[in-house]
Image (tube, coloured by chain):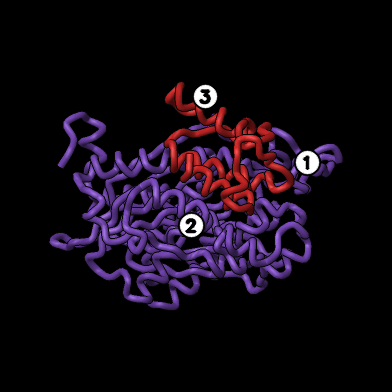
Chain colours: A red, B purple
């Protein structure tokens, strides 16, 4: 997940070391962060997640679970 | 050359037509990031530039319409001497901000531009895919011997649809217009337009929309009620709304497919193209698409820093600049891809 964490750290404007599954997405989890995360997930995993699903995520782990769910479906969101 | 089936056979042809000249026009008023940052505390000017790649955009004045911008772009094109008014056979105006419900804005422009009454004129209502669609109609009219010179005008004033407190779209869109002359390529010439790939997904109609103000939902006190979304953006149903994530997903899904399909139909590979002119949505979109398409970054045109996303005019703005700079010249092979509101998309190959 390192490439993903690296990108997520940039989006959340924190150090990569701070990105853990428990990490709260917090105040910076706005529409721009969500759009950026869609592009990151598409780039790293080649899957597309819906913006409203990402908006419901509270932690980094929630985002990872969403990605995993889409990867196992291996299709578009 | 690819293509055995009827539809492939039809679309595999490069039409003996050419983009002979391009001129553009921008309204005077500049809307800078500093001005926007003063309205949006969470978004300093540096962040707007970093995320969008846009420093400033232009905004039409009160009472200045898309038709006015298109008029000035056309006048600039005539001033170059590329074509005489009396030689224009057909006028196509692509806009989503017509002067009236009726008559057709292109008809108003025929008279205002002093074009002969023998000119055919019509509007097409498309956004970011509009230039490529307009080009397909122009090239088709010429290849079908229905016209020799087609004036394709693209113009929009999205600023008038945008709520001042909606940073999600106000940072991105700019007003502007372009005039493109499409002509017949003489026998033995090397310029061409086509083949074309088209696509439409109306299921995403609500992802980029001005919901109220036309026939389905006329403006009323109710549609004008403003609400603030989770990100602090304010708008009503009279204003432009964009679901940025959904539009990004659509673009990442359909643009690579359209590009692959076009190359299959044209019998080309990415290496055959000198320039890739994608709709200039913003830096973020172009970064994501360039990565996904796996084409050399230097071949991917970028022209939005000082004008923003001018909707159907982004591609001709690129063409005008690259022709002026010498990046493009006769013989240059380019891929043009428009995509956005509709949802709608189209791609084509051209040789200048």
Foreground residue, B199 or B133?
Answer: B199
Q: Is residue B68 in view from this perspective?
A: yes
**Residue B141 visible in the snapshot:** no
Res. B280 mark: 2
Q: Chain of mark 1?
A: B
C-alpha separation, residue under disc 2 versus residue under disc 3: 33 Å
Which residue lies under the disc numbered 3? A69
The residue shown at (56%, 29%) is A66
In terms of image quadrants, where is residue B325? bottom left
Mark 2 and mark 3 in contact? Answer it, CB < 8 Å.
no
Which residue is the extreme one toward the left?
Answer: B188
To which quarter of the image does residue B334 belong?
A: bottom left
Q: Residue at 22% of width from left, 54% of height from top? A: B271
Evaluate whether label 2 is on the same chain as label 3.
no
Relative side of B151 to B312, left or right:
left
Q: Secondary structure at mark 3?
A: helix
Chain under label 3?
A
Seen from this angle, which residue lies furthest right? B221
């Amino acid at each position: 997940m390192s490439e993903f964490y690296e990108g997520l750290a940039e989006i959340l404007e924190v150090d990569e070391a701070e990105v853990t599954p428990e990490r709260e997405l917090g105040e910076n989890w706005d529409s721009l962060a969500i759009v950026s995360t869609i592009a990151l997930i598409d780039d790293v995993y080649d899957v597309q997640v819906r913006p409203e699903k990402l908006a419901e995520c509270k932690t980094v782990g929630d985002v990872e679970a969403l990605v995993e769910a889409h990867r196992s479906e291996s299709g578009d969101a | 050359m690819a293509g055995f089936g009827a539809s492939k056979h039809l679309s595999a042809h490069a039409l003996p037509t050419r983009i002979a000249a391009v001129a553009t026009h921008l309204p005077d008023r500049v809307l800078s990031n500093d001005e926007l940052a003063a309205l949006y505390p969470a978004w300093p000017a540096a962040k707007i530039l970093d995320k969008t790649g846009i420093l400033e955009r232009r905004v039409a004045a009160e009472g200045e319409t898309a038709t006015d911008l298109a008029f000035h772009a056309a006048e600039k094109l005539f001033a170059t001497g590329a074509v005489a008014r009396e030689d224009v056979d057909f006028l196509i105006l692509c806009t989503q901000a017509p002067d009236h419900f009726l008559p057709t804005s292109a008809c108003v422009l025929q008279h205002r531009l002093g074009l002969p009454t023998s000119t055919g004129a019509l509007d097409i209502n498309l956004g970011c895919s509009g230039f490529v669609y307009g080009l397909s109609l122009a090239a088709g009219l010429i290849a079908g011997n229905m016209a020799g010179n087609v004036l394709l005008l693209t113009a929009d004033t999205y600023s008038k649809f945008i709520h001042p407190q909606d940073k999600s779209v106000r940072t991105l869109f700019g007003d502007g217009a372009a005039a493109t002359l499409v002509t017949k390529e003489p026998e033995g010439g090397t310029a061409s337009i086509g083949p074309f790939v088209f696509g439409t997904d109306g299921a995403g109609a609500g992802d980029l929309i001005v919901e109220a103000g036309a026939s389905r939902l006329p403006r009323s006190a109710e549609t004008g009620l403003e609400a603030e979304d989770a990100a602090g953006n304010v708008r009503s149903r009279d204003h432009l709304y964009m679901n940025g994530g959904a539009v990004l997903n659509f673009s990442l899904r359909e643009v690579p497919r359209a590009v692959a399909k076009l190359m299959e139909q044209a019998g080309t590979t990415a290496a055959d193209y000198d320039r890739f002119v994608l709709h200039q949505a913003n830096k973020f979109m172009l970064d994501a698409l360039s990565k996904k398409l796996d084409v050399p970054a230097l071949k991917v045109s970028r022209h939005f820093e000082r004008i923003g996303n001018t909707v159907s005019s982004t591609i001709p703005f690129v063409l005008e600049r690259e022709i002026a700079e010498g990046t493009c010249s006769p013989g240059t092979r380019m891929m043009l891809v428009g995509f956005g509101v509709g949802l709608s998309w189209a791609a084509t190959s051209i040789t200048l």
